[in-house]
Image (cartoon, rainbow, N blue to C red):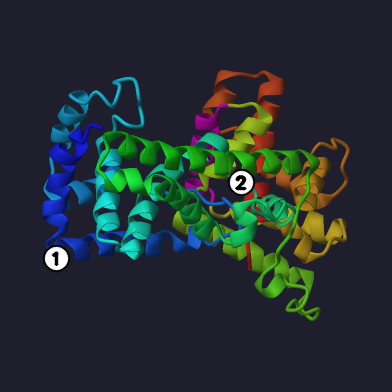
Amino acid sequence: MSQFFTKEIYTKVEEQLNKPNVDKAFSQIVEKYIDYNSAKLSTSGPVNKTLFSDAEKKKIFDLLQIDEKFIVKTLSSSSSVKSTWKIMTKPFNILMACIIRFYSLKKDYKMVNKAVAYYMFSIYPSYFKKYFTYGTNENIMNYTINNMSNKYKIKQEGVLLISLISTAYGSYTNYQGALDRGEDKAYVDLIMGINTRINSFLKKIATEYYDNHKKQNFLNVERDNFDDENYSESKSNVFVINTITNGVVSNMINYGVNYKYVDIAAKMNKISRNELKNHVNLIISNHNEDLPQIIEGILYTYLISGKKEPKQINSSDFILFCMDVYKKSNTVDNNIIKVKKILDGWMSETELYRKTQRVATINNFRRAVFTFFVLTIQSYRV
């Protein structure tokens, strides 16, 4: 069996990782990445997007003093990798396979686990985007995971981070023997195996998730002051409205727009995502005084006029109720009338309004802005 990768690439990786300071530095890079993303990956299922940048990959190339171009040239000379294989022609992938082999030969399985995890983190964002392009609703995802069969690893492990690492590690277990022998095919099988497993892992969850999304199945895990156990009945709805309004406005002004909700609102109302994004950013920049009014108006309509409970704000009922109220043209609710008046004022400033007087287009855009604020409020936790 060919050992081209072992002779050309692995030996250079081994030379560097045999240095205690390099070995320690690699471990620290992995730990730092996990610490930074632990909160996003500590959910029951895939809820939050993570990033794995080129700068993150460059840390490893620099640490091991290996030129990315050298690996590209080496891969092009190998008979084990075809130029059409998108996954295996990426230099970082074969580099990580070599690192995994180094710790495997050392029988340092703790570091094998770290190396496998780090490679998995590098591919997870692309597979997340593949299956959850517009992100996920945490309550629907919680319901999905809670109702999955125990045969699924994510149900067995209980936490996304552990499930992902365990899934990826299975590929190492399958090809450990051949990898330790340094066979070229083992490097390819290891990397392709991890990709296949993570892809399948998310695909299965996505199938269940979108079925529950269609049926509007939610598992509303309340937290903090809105918990059934913690929520104090002495706090009036007005206090709740003020708390949420201040929190949502503060988040938007200090941290900017959550583009996930822009994407969803644009798609729901069939309008341009970029035009909506620009308009929402303009609103937040130029109309700080209107933001509390529109958020209060929506919340007053739901909690006071609708006689709903604060804990329901984070449920699908909030979205369905708000959209149903919005579409009623003959409403007498002063709060929703005020909300629509504010939306109309904002609309008059848009480029879209100046370009077209088509009623349907303007209505869709106005409804999209309303949808964005409803989604933003629904996601807020006190």
Q: Position of residue 66 (x, y in %)?
A: 13, 44
What's the amino acid at mark 1? Asn
* Secondary element type, mark 2: loop
Q: Nearer the viewer, mark 2 or mark 1?
A: 1
Task: Name the residue located 39 percent from the left edge and 61 percent from the top edge.
Answer: 34
Query: Which quadrant: the C terminus?
Result: bottom right
Determine the image quadrant of residue 160: bottom right
Q: Front-most of 302 and 285?
A: 302
Q: Is residue 93 above or below residue 78?
A: below
**Badge 2 is on which residue?**
136
Q: Position of residue 81 (x, y in %)?
A: 29, 26
Q: Position of residue 356 (x, y in %)?
A: 60, 18
Task: Name the residue located 88 percent from the left edge and 46 percent from the top edge.
Answer: 332
Q: Is residue 278 magenta?
A: yes
Q: Front-most of 181 and 291?
A: 181
Q: Is residue 319 magenta?
A: no
Q: Give the main secondary structure of the magenta stretch.
A: helix
Q: Position of residue 248 (x, y in %)?
A: 59, 59
Query: Which quadrant: the N terminus?
Result: top left
Q: Front-most of 147 and 5?
A: 5
Q: Which residues are magenta?
A: 272-287
Determine the image quadrant of residue 244: bottom right
Can residue 134 be seen here? The reply is: no
Q: Rate crowding at label 1 as few (under 14), some (14 to 19) or many (20 or more) other CA atoms within 10 Å.
A: few
Q: What is the CA distance from the residue labelled 2 to the residue labelled 1? A: 41 Å
Task: Name the residue located 73 percent from the left edge and 72 percent from the top edge.
Answer: 227
Q: Which residue is situated farthest in the front direction here?
A: 1
**Badge 1 is on which residue?**
21
Can residue 173 be seen here? The reply is: yes
What's the amino acid at mark 2? Thr
Nearer-N-terminus badge (2/1): 1
